[in-house]
Image: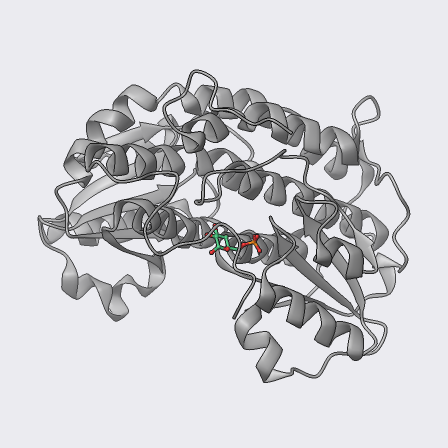
Amino acid sequence: FLVDKGNYRHFMAKEIYEQPEVVGRTFAHYVDLAAGRVALPEALPFDLANLSRISITACGTAYYAGLVAKYWFEKLARLPVEIDVASEARYREPPLEKGGLTIVISQSGETADTLASLRYAKSQGQHTLAVVNVPTSTIAREASAVVPTLAGPEIGVASTKAFSCQLTVLLCLALAAGRARGTLDEMQEKRLVDALIKVPGLMAEALKQEDEIEVLAREIAKARDVLYLGRGTAYPMALEGALKLKEISYIHAEGYAAGELKHGPIALIDDAVPVIVIAPHDATFEKTVSNMQEVAARGGRIVLIGDARGADAAGLDTLATLMMPDLDPVVAPIVYAVPMQLLAYHTAVVLGKDVDQPRNLAKSVTVE
Ligand code: G6P
C-alpha cells in the first residue's frame, strides 16, 4: 500500500517518530492490558516450561535485538540463551537439541542467512519461532510459529521502528517464559507489564530531546571515530547505537561492553573521540560511572545517555547529557533506542548523507 513521508524530510525520521504508536500497538497484541498480564494471541506449538535453552539467530539490527533478549530470557525466565549471527550459525552447524527452540528475528523475513539458519534448525528437529515484520515473508511461512512485530512497512534502510517492536515482542516472550517456568510471580509480571505499558509515553518524552540531539550531532559530525559503551542490556544497545551511526553517517563507530574498556579501546581515548555512554540508573550503574571517570581522566569527551538520578550521581563534566525519563531498567533498551537513532539521523543529516538509502547497503539482503 501507499507509504509516504508525510511531513518528514526522510522516512527514517518518520519511522523514529512512529515508535510510540507502533510499539504500543505491538504490545497490545501480546498483553492483556486490563489484567496487566502477558497473553499471547495464539498458543505456541511448544511448551516454554519444558525448554532447557533457546538459540537465537539474526543479522544486523535484528541480531542486536536478540542480544538484548538474551539478557531478558536469562534474567526473567532463567533460561540459557545461545545467540549468533545467522551467517555464522548456518555454517557452524551447532548441535541443537531435538524438540528445542530456535528463535529467528528478521524485519523483512527474507534475509538469506537468517532463512538458512532457520532451515538448519528445522533440519535438527527444533521448533522455530519467527519474530518478523512482514507476515507474508518466506521466514514467516517456514517457521513453525510466528510472533509478528506490528511496526508497519519500514522504508529507511537503517532499521528503527522494527527494532523497537522486535524488542517489545521479545520482552513479552521473556515474560511469558518467566511465567511458564515459575521464575516470575504474578506481582512481578504485573509490575513489568505496567512498565511496558508506560513505554510509548516514555518514548514520546525521549523524542523531546531532539533539539539537544541536533546540537550534539554537529559535534559528533566532526569526529572520525566514536565509541559507544554500555553494560547489561545497554551493551547490545551500544552495539546497535554504533551500527546506526556508521550505517548512515559513515563515521567509524564501535560499541563495547563498558567493562572491556580497559582491555583495548581505552588506548583510543583522547579529546577527538566522543564516548557515548548508555547508562540507565540500574544495578550496574556505579560500575559504568567508574568507566566514565577513566574516560574523563584521559581527556575523553563523554556523552551520557541516562536519567537525572544517574547524571547527579555521576557528577561528571560531559560534552552533553541526553536526559532520559525515569523508568524500570528492564524496559530501558526500548526507550533508549530513541536518542541513539536521533543522534545517528541528525549526524548524517549534518554531513549531507543519503539517510534513507546509505551507500552500499540494502534494506533486505536476500543473497549471501
Ligand atoms: C540489512 C539492513 C539492516 C537489517 C539487516 C537484517 O543489513 O540494512 O537494517 O538489520 O539487513 O535484516 P532483517 O530484514 O533480517 O531484519
Q: What residue is rendered at 30% in x and 51% in y?
A: 246
Q: Residue furthest front?
A: 2
Q: Residue at x 78, y 24 (%)?
A: 33
Determine whether 21 is above or below 27 in the image. Answer: above
**Is 138 in front, or is 347?**
138
Q: How is the model colour-coded?
A: one colour
- Number of marks in the rendered image: 0
Q: Residue 16: x and y, percent?
A: 46, 30
Report whether 1 appears left or right of 44.
left
- Horizontally, residue 34 falls left or right of residue 216, namely right
Q: Quadrant of the N terminus?
A: top right
Q: Residue at x 78, y 60 (%)?
A: 143
User: Looking at the image, which is closer to me, 129 or 191?
Assistant: 129
Whether residue 85 is visible to the viewer of this picture, yes or no, is no
- The quadrant holding residue 249 is top left
Q: Can see residue 286?
A: yes
Would residue 36 be found to the left or right of residue 171 on screen? right
Q: Give the left or right position of residue 200, taking residue 150 as reference.
A: left
Residue 329: % across, % down: 53, 39
Residue 56, percent across and down? 64, 64
Answer above or below: position of 172 versus 200.
Answer: below
- Residue 342, given in percent of the width and then of the height, sits at 36, 32
